[in-house]
Image: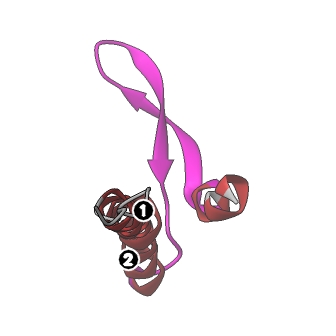
Amino acid sequence: ISFVLSTPILMYQRIEEGYWYGPRQYSMERFPCKRHERAFILYQFIAAYLLPVLTISFCYTLMVKRVGQPTVEPVDN
């Protein structure tokens, strides 16, 4: 799943030459148009932030609900 979610990064990353205290190579994002750039930013927000936050919140909600339930049925005295 992680590999599939990172395929857009493989599509838009390019290695470019630059100069910063000497010649260097940089990994830069290059988009064919502004619409692709906006879609990529939205995708990154959803895939790298929103999806994990929702998954963690859901799991913690289930854990808190489970902790609140008694594991042993009370016995009448």
Residue 32 counted in the magenta span? yes
Q: Is residue 36 visible?
A: yes
Residue 17 counted in the magenta span? yes
Q: Is residue 65 above or below residue 26?
A: below
Quarter of the figure that contains the C terminus: bottom left
Left or right side of 29 for 54: left
Number of on-image labels: 2
Dot 2 amino acid type? Leu
Residue indicated by mark 1: 59
Dot 1 amino acid type? Cys
Q: Is residue 16 above or below residue 40?
A: above
* Circle number at residue 42: 2
Q: Is residue 23 above or below residue 70?
A: above
Query: What kind of element bears circle 2?
Result: helix
Residue at position x 33%, y 68% in the image:
65
Q: Earlier in the sequence, mark 1 or mark 2?
A: 2
Residue at position x 49%, y 60% in the image:
30
Badge 2 local density, few (<14 within 10 Å), some, or many (20+)? few
Find residue 15 and report its horizontal and vertical position in percent.
57, 40
- Range shown magenta: 10-34
Between 59 and 2, the one nearer to me in the picture: 59
Find residue 10 and report its horizontal and vertical position in percent.
65, 55
Find residue 2 and report its horizontal and vertical position in percent.
65, 54
Distance between mark 1 and mark 2 Cα atoms = 24 Å
